[in-house]
Image (cartoon, helix red, strand yellow):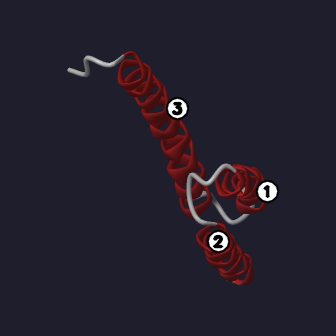
Amino acid sequence: MPRIKSAKKRMRQAQSASARNRTQRSQLRTAIKKVRTAAPADAAGAFADAVGVIDRAGRKNLIHRNAAARQKSRLAKAVARAKSK
């Protein structure tokens, strides 16, 4: 346990940030999973929702911006493949 006041505060901040990041990462994974498991008719709507979640995660440095772009690209290809079948 930290003894110094600033270290105690930093520990509290780290715990709250960790909880927030865990929640947002879970939402991100859920949104991606919904697109991948959606029926072809519903995939476009799920993709639109997922793009917003992915963009927000990239903006807030939850994931790297390039990783966000890569995920969106791969999801878009998956949705296009589902529609063409």
Q: Position of residue 67 (x, y in %)?
A: 59, 71
Nearer the viewer's eye, disc 1 or disc 3?
3
Nearer the viewer's eye, disc 2 or disc 3?
3
Q: Earlier in the sequence, mark 2 or mark 1?
A: 1
Residue holding disc 2: 75
Residue holding disc 1: 48
Instruction: Name the kind of residue labelled 3 in the image.
Output: Arg
Instruction: Name the kind of residue labelled 1 in the image.
Output: Ala
Secondary structure beneath dot 3 equals helix
Left or right of 19: which side holds 47? Answer: right
Q: Position of residue 14 (x, y in %)?
A: 43, 31
Left or right of 81: which side holds 8? Answer: left
Closer to us: 75 or 54: 54
Residue at the spot 51% in from the left edge and 52% down from the top edge: 29
Q: Position of residue 60 (x, y in %)?
A: 67, 49
Q: CA distance from mark 2 to mark 1?
A: 10 Å
Residue at the spot 36% in from the left edge and 19% down from the top edge: 8
Q: Earlier in the sequence, mark 2 or mark 3?
A: 3
Badge number at residue 20: 3
